[in-house]
Image (cartoon, rainbow, N blue to C red):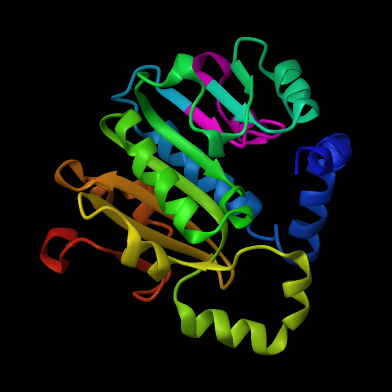
Amino acid sequence: MHKFYDMIAKDYDQLVQNDVLNHTYPYSGYNDMQKIITNYIYDNKHIQKPKILDIGIGTAALYEKLLPNSFSLTGIDISKRMLDISALKFPNAILYNHDILKGLPEELSNEKYDYIIINYVIKHIDIDLAVDLINKLSKNLSPFGKIFIGDVMFLEEGRRRFYLNDHAEILSYNYYLHTYNDFVCKANELLALSFMEINIYTGILIVEKYYESSLHFEESLIKYKTNTVKWKSTQSKNKRE
């Protein structure tokens, strides 16, 4: 995998934007995903200078939408060439060339973060490894911290089958086609999971510690809800309302 991303690193941002402009799989929802996550970080000004851990940081394109001195950034990526690009954009970032499936780098094992971002990574790993990663990373969240996972992900199995009926060619990408319900069934019960559907095959999975959950009262995310189907949470109905 690192060889593949090393090979496309210099063209990666353009490849992504080609999908966005042409509304094509798999990155068509990329810009909307970036906007939602960065708006949330920007709007929560009670965190003076949030500590962010980005797993699969790539070219760090997400952070071009934030003021460079407004956050503290640590990034991990399996591709050295991707990290070289990130380092040029954000020379103050702490960057690790590391395979996250081996766990966090030892230096980070006891660090706490306000936001852990994992975009377009879990499509490469099966559901059990993805859930195990989430469970472990939840221990590195600061109080009221959140994990944002943006990726190829369906709301539930019916929507996945519906899309595959007309787009069987996406199977050639060899990505894991996860659903929000896959994570709900397997995640630690102490975690509250929510899902925002950006398009039928793209969404943001939001993970919080259940007893600290506050996400559903935040206007910066709620304003993106287009109907009652596209916003799902493991929290009780009364609590969400």
| Residue furthest top as drawn | 92
Q: Position of residue 199 (x, y in %)?
A: 57, 68
In the visual, does 100 lie left or right of 240? right
User: Is residue 71 in sight in this rendering?
Assistant: no
Q: Quadrant of residue 140?
A: top left
| Residue furthest left as drawn | 238
* The N terminus, quarter of image: top right
50 in relation to 225, above or below? above
Magenta-colored stretch includes residue 58 = yes
Q: Nearer the viewer, residue 52 or 33?
A: 52
Tell me how many marks there are: 0
| Residue furthest front as drawn | 102
The residue at the point 73 percent across, 66 percent down is 25
Q: Quadrant of residue 61?
A: top right
Q: Position of residue 109 (x, y in %)?
A: 40, 21
165 in relation to 159, above or below? below
The residue at the point 32 percent across, 67 percent down is 185
* The C terminus, quarter of image: bottom left
Q: Quadrant of residue 148?
A: top left
Q: Position of residue 142 (x, y in %)?
A: 29, 27
Q: Nearer the viewer, residue 212 or 123?
A: 123
The residue at the point 48 percent across, 48 percent down is 149
Magenta-colored stretch includes residue 109 = no
Q: Position of residue 215 (x, y in %)?
A: 28, 48
In the visual, does 195 lie left or right of 61? left
User: Is residue 228 in sight in this rendering?
Assistant: yes
Q: Which residues are magenta?
A: 53-73
The residue at the point 44 percent across, 32 percent down is 42
In the visual, does 113 lie left or right of 237? right
